[in-house]
Image (cartoon, helix red, strand yellow):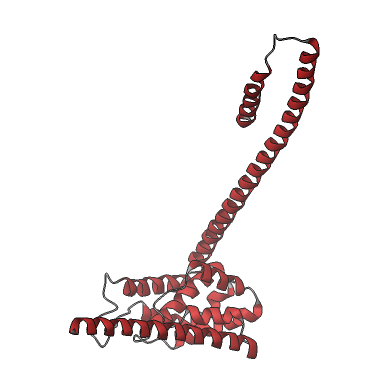
Amino acid sequence: MSILGNNENLGSSSSFHEFKKNASFFLKEKIKTARLALTDVTPAQLLVEESTNGNPWAPDARTLKMISKAAFEIDDYWRIVNVLHNRLVRFDAKNWRISYKAVVVLEHLLTHGPESVAEEFRIHKDVIQQMTNFQYVDEKGFNWGIKGFNWGVNVRMKSERILKFLNESSSLKEERLRARKLSRGIEGFGSFTQRVSSDHGVLQQSLVEKYKRSNSQFIENGFLEENQIQDENSESRNPIKKPATILALLMDLVML
């Protein structure tokens, strides 16, 4: 009886947790919609705020691309920059995720966004330097900065990479060039696959049209030939062989 009771309690707890999660998401979406409708906040600003919050998930490649693209618009540029400034200024070991995710966004802006980003964030070199020595032991005794733990390693490595870009203009220029070539290569491959698909479609259509014309001519010629055979009362040619001729024609078209 107690086992059943425990199972029921676990089920209820799980359902309640799921309800809280869904309710929280719903409220956040409503707040986001209200901010867009009632304030001067932009979608790009909201995207940066969400990408640098305290959640354990770092922004994905698609989100980073959207942010760097928006940064080329002057209004969104300053909104994005201000959010990142606030995230970095507030750095402390306990809330390290916020500043770390800001560094992730900053790295992508340095390599894919406007060139002015580097100059804008040189004032935060001291903060980023602190992050290269990241260590944090939480209230449960877990050390988030230990070697071999991915988060701790990521914070230090990402911060070191940002410092290098901010201190060495040549390294940043080289990385921006490499990123540009890589982006163009990906875009070029996408265009190539679309072109191949389009060419394949054109080829298929031309084969269909060619088959229609050939089949039409065959039927017309076959009809005249059959009438001629009937008129001449000749049994030397057998019309049953015509399907084989159709098959041969189709094989020829496929081999084109």
Q: In which quarter of the image is residue 73?
A: bottom right
In this rendering, the count of numbered labels is 0
Which residue does the image show at 64% across and 91% down from the upper left?
Answer: 38
Q: In this view, does 194 lie to the left or right of 55?
A: right
Give residue 89's position: percent from left, percent from top: 45, 87
Give residue 49's position: percent from left, percent from top: 51, 82
* Viewer-closest of 82 and 60: 60
Which residue does the image show at 55% across and 55% down from the upper left?
Answer: 186
Q: Quadrant of the C terminus?
A: top right
175 vs 39: above or below: above
Which residue does the image show at 59% across and 88% down from the upper left?
Answer: 34
Which residue does the image show at 58% across and 53% down from the upper left?
Answer: 190
Give residue 83's position: percent from left, percent from top: 53, 84
Q: In this rendering, does residue 39 appear at all?
A: no
* Viewer-closest of 130 and 52: 52
Instruction: State the residue lying farthest toward the left.
Output: 2
Q: In which quarter of the image is the N terminus?
A: bottom left
Give residue 128's position: percent from left, percent from top: 41, 79
* Viewer-closest of 155 and 193: 193
206 vs 43: above or below: above
Q: Quadrant of residue 103?
A: bottom left
152 vs 30: above or below: above
Q: In this rendering, does residue 239 appear at all?
A: yes
Q: Quadrant of residue 56?
A: bottom left
